[in-house]
Image (cartoon, rainbow, N blue to C red):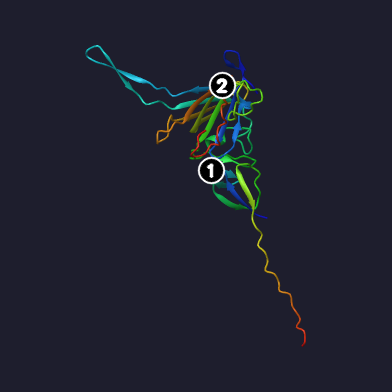
Amino acid sequence: MSSQFDGAWSETALVGIAAQSGSDMAFQAITETVDIDIGDKDFDVIATLGGGRLVKFTPQEPTTITLEAYPVEAGTDSGTTGLGFFDLLNTTSASQPQDLDVDRTRSKYRIAIMWTDLSTATTANEAIGTNNAALRVVAAHGYFTSVKPSFTDGVLKFTVTYKVPPFDSSGTANVAIQSTDIAGATLTALASYTSTTRW
Amino acid sequence: MSYKVTNKLGNPVKFGDTIFQPHETKVLEEKPTSDKFIVEMTEEKEEPKKMKKVERRDK
């Protein structure tokens, strides 16, 4: 799969989701849209009596990634192809039939979205060598907060929301944006996602 | 036949009615096929070997 790259990325993208210590699962085959709302680094303005303005920075907001997708299963019981989303919100199932109960589990996931002109690329976590361009957004240690199915238009569409704070409790970044140009160096593959390795 | 099954993930995983906590190992009678698990066959208990009767030779 390759995105069209003629001044802008268009048409296609790769979407990968990984559980901690799990394989990256490719979701682009069932995903229609991706919206990435990188957390604002906003500030307030304090007006002084002398007519000046003081800037008061507010801490960066969480990043939210929203997918519109058309899964046909409740979750992904096995393999590296994403089949459903409810198991990202609750305890995942590893057998058929899948029976995903609503629970209090909060599981951390990594999500990667990549645009590349490398025609053989199939996963959002793979390396992109020289002579090819790519843009990748990766977020780790975040949670799926919403999985909403809708059948309004006569097709079962899911709106899925992933939310991640900009940093962990130690101040380490949870979000990265990576790219390489055609003449650039290799964009390295993402390392396997674990509790200590983000990308 | 039984299998030593370990949850590979850092998240809980359900196999049928059995819930595996992150990286937890359990012994199951059924072999899971999901790549979320590391599956090893448990060793069968060996029956104690019967001693062969050795006839004493008359001197």
Q: Is residue B51 above or below residue A18?
A: below
Q: Do labels 1 and 2 share a chain?
A: no
For the residues labelled 1 and 2, the Cα–Cα distance comes to: 41 Å
- Seen as rendered, the residue at the extreme right is B58
Name the residue at 56% across, 21% down.
Answer: A184
At mark 1, the secondary structure is loop
Of the residues tagged 1 and 2, which is closer to the observer? 2
Give the amino acid at mark 2.
Answer: Gly
Name the residue at 54% across, 23% down.
Answer: A179
- Seen as rendered, the residue at the extreme left is A49
- Seen as rendered, the residue at the extreme bottom is B59
| Residue A198 seen | yes
On residue A184, the disc is 2
Give the amino acid at mark 1.
Answer: Pro
Residue A173 occupies which quadrant of the picture? Answer: top left
Left or right position of A142 against A54: right
Left or right position of A198 against B51: left
Q: Between residues B45 and A132, which one lies in front from this camera angle?
A: A132
Q: Position of residue A80 (x, y in %)?
A: 63, 35
Residue A44 occupies which quadrant of the picture? Answer: top left
The subunit carrying tag 2 is A
The residue labelled by disc 1 is B12
